[in-house]
Image (spheres, rainbow, N blue to C red):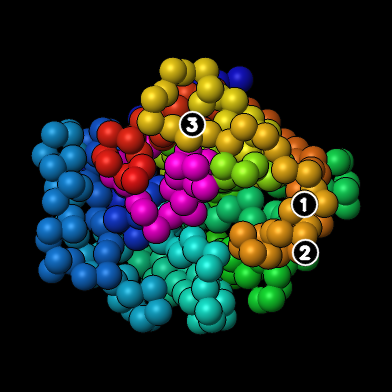
């Protein structure tokens, strides 16, 4: 199913939003490797210390990078960065679950940010394609949603209909943002929208992103936070490096279109732990047992797991169909063990385990 990546034309720059993010960093790395000029947006381009690692990456790559200040909530702020760009990679969006005000901290930035970037694409004649980083969260809210799917799998035809501001607000934000993207894309005919729907993104980033949910989850798995036992939560996992490759191919394959479920493994927290046991780690404090569901029901709220989450996710199956990403994008996925072990090694080597 896999096939070689396309050759990207280098006669026009490309735009990547949210350049300092976990996923965006690897996307930028992939684009620079092809010799492209990357226009990278950040909240404040004058804070050059935060951008040094991207500058050094560009200096060691065939491509080059330019930084632009832009605000997701400010209409028109992407105009300068997008000028002359043929492909726009809209990666910027918050990925946090512990928020006090989900409407203003999650939904508004995701939806209005998407609207502002895509309306700017409408106003920029050079743009021919927009690659939007959505999520499997726009496909489902809880593992229990699998039962209602037409084919018994999470695929590109399925939309999340169960998330609310009170339950899974992050998933709601991704759903509404993607729907807004399709609304804008279908109202015009100059540029094409291609959407990435990754499962849980793991693997080493260009640097550690302590505020990412992926980092938080793996750190809890390896630092002893689950010493009393781990929940049997099923998840899809995609390596951040594979996700970057998917973005690149979505941007330059002539026939790329529509949504793409990106999940290399139908995994679970116990499976992640087992892959870590394959190596003789000295630093890790891995959980040794799976907590029964009834125990999590009782004590979960004290550990940050709500009872609705426990009832709709713990012990329930999770299954995704990733065939489109393989057949249409030619994507080949890394094994789960490689993703998890490389990610754990980065956390240890960068002194983040304590």
Between 317 and 225, which is closer to the camera in this rendering?
A: 225
**Local crowd at mark 1 within 10 Å, few (<14), some, or many (≥20)?**
few
Real-space CA distance between mark 3 and mark 2, rounded to the nearest whole angstrom: 28 Å
**Local crowd at mark 2 within 10 Å, few (<14), some, or many (≥20)?**
few
Q: Which of marks 1 and 3 is nearer the N terminus?
A: 1
Asked whether 346 falls inside the magenta stretch, the response is no
Q: In this figure, which residue is indicated by the disc labeled 1? A: 295
Residue at left 74%, top 53%? 296
Residue 347 visible within the image: yes
Which label was assigned to residue 340?
3
Residue 201 in percent (x, y) is at 51, 43
- Residue furthest to the front in view is 228
Please indicate whether residue 156 sits to the left or right of residue 216 in the image: right
Real-space CA distance between mark 1 and mark 3, rounded to the nearest whole angstrom: 27 Å
Which label was assigned to residue 265?
none
Q: In this figure, which residue is indicated by the disc labeled 2? A: 308
Residue at left 55%, top 55%? 134
Q: Earlier in the sequence, mark 3 or mark 2?
A: 2
Between 118 and 94, which is closer to the camera in this rendering?
A: 94
Query: Which quadrant is home to the N terminus?
Result: top right
Residue 229 in percent (x, y) is at 65, 42
SS for tag 2? Answer: helix
Please indicate whether residue 121 sits to the left or right of residue 179 in the image: left
Residue 58, image quadrant: top left
Question: Where does the magenta region start and end?
Answer: 204-225
Between 64 and 223, which is closer to the camera in this rendering?
A: 223
Residue at left 27%, top 70%? 43
Select label 2 or label 1 by which is in front.
1
Residue 180 in the image: above or below residue 201 = below
Residue 55 in percent (x, y) is at 14, 47
């Amino acid at each position: 199913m896999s096939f070689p990546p396309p050759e990207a034309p280098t006669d026009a720059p490309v735009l990547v939003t949210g350049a300092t993010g976990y996923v965006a960093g690897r996307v930028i790395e992939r684009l620079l490797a092809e010799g492209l000029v990357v226009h990278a947006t950040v909240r404040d381009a004058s804070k050059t210390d935060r951008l040094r690692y991207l500058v050094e990456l560009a200096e060691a790559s065939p491509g080059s990078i330019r930084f632009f200040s832009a605000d997701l909530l400010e209409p028109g702020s992407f105009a300068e960065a997008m000028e002359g760009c043929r492909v726009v990679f809209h990666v910027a969006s918050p990925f946090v679950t512990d928020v006090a005000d989900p409407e203003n901290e999650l939904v508004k930035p995701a939806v209005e940010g998407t609207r502002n970037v895509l309306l700017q694409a409408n106003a920029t004649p050079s743009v021919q394609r927009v690659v939007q980083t959505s999520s499997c969260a726009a496909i489902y809210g809880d593992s229990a949603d699998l039962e209602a799917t037409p084919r018994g799998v999470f695929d590109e035809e399925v939309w999340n209909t169960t998330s609310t501001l009170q339950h899974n607000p992050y998933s709601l934000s991704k759903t509404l943002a993607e729907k807004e993207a399709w609304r804008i894309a279908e109202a015009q005919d100059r540029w094409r929208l291609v959407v990435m729907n990754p499962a849980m993104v793991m693997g080493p980033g260009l640097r550690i992103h302590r505020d990412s949910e992926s980092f938080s989850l793996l750190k809890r798995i390896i630092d002893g936070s689950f010493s009393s036992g781990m929940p049997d939560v099923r998840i899809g996992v995609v390596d951040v490096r594979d996700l970057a490759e998917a973005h690149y191919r979505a941007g330059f394959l002539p026939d790329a279109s529509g949504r793409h479920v990106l999940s290399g493994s139908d995994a679970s927290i116990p499976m992640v732990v087992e892959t870590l046991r394959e190596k003789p780690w000295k630093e890790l404090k891995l959980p040794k047992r799976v907590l029964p569901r009834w125990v999590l029901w009782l004590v979960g709220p004290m550990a940050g797991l709500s009872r609705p989450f426990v009832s709709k996710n713990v012990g329930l199956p999770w299954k995704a169909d990733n065939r489109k990403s393989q057949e249409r994008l030619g994507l080949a996925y890394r094994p789960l063990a490689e993703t998890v072990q490389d990610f754990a090694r980065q956390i240890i080597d960068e002194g983040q385990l304590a």
